[in-house]
Image (cartoon, rainbow, N blue to C red):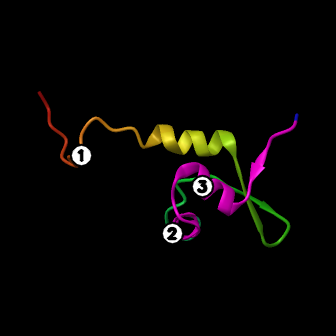
Amino acid sequence: MHTALFNTKQAAEFLGVSCAFLERDRCYTGRIRFIKVGSRAVRYRLDDLNQFIENQVRRSTSHVAVSL
């Protein structure tokens, strides 16, 4: 099985965010899964980037839950 891996710059371009956004996410929130290759290289799988996008889908900008 061959899975294409994106480096940070490629992943940022794919998501339309900055490299700094991904670096902060890795350090603080961990919302986007990534792979460490060796001691320093960070890579992202396409499936994980798409999963992050799917997790961002919202119906409202409100943070308040409304029960009907």
Between tags 2 and 3, which lies in front?
Answer: 3
SS under mark 2: helix
Q: Which residue is mark 1?
A: 61
Residue at mark 2 to residue at mark 3: CA–CA distance? 21 Å
- The magenta stretch is 2-25
Q: Position of residue 51 (x, y in %)?
A: 56, 39
Q: Earlier in the sequence, mark 1 or mark 3?
A: 3
Q: Amino acid at mark 1?
A: Thr
> Image check: 1 left or right of 6?
right
Measure the alpha-carbon separation of dots 1 and 2.
Answer: 23 Å
| Label 1: how many Cα within 10 Å (few below 14, some 14–19, many 20+) | few
Q: Is residue 11 magenta?
A: yes
Tell me the residue at 52%/53% (across/down). 16
Q: Is residue 37 above or below residue 51?
A: below
Circle 3 sits in a helix, a strand or a loop, which is it? helix
Q: Amino acid at mark 3?
A: Glu
Location of mark 3 (residue)? 13
Residue 27 placement (x, y as % from top left): 56, 70
State left or right for residue 10 relative to residue 39.
left
Look at the numbered discs 1 and 3 and tell me whether their residues touch, using CB distance below 8 Å: no
Location of mark 2 (residue): 28
Q: Residue at x 49, y 63 (%)?
A: 29
Secondary structure of the residue carrying tag 1 is loop
Q: Is residue 1 left or right of residue 14?
A: right
| Residue found at x 59% / y 65% | 26
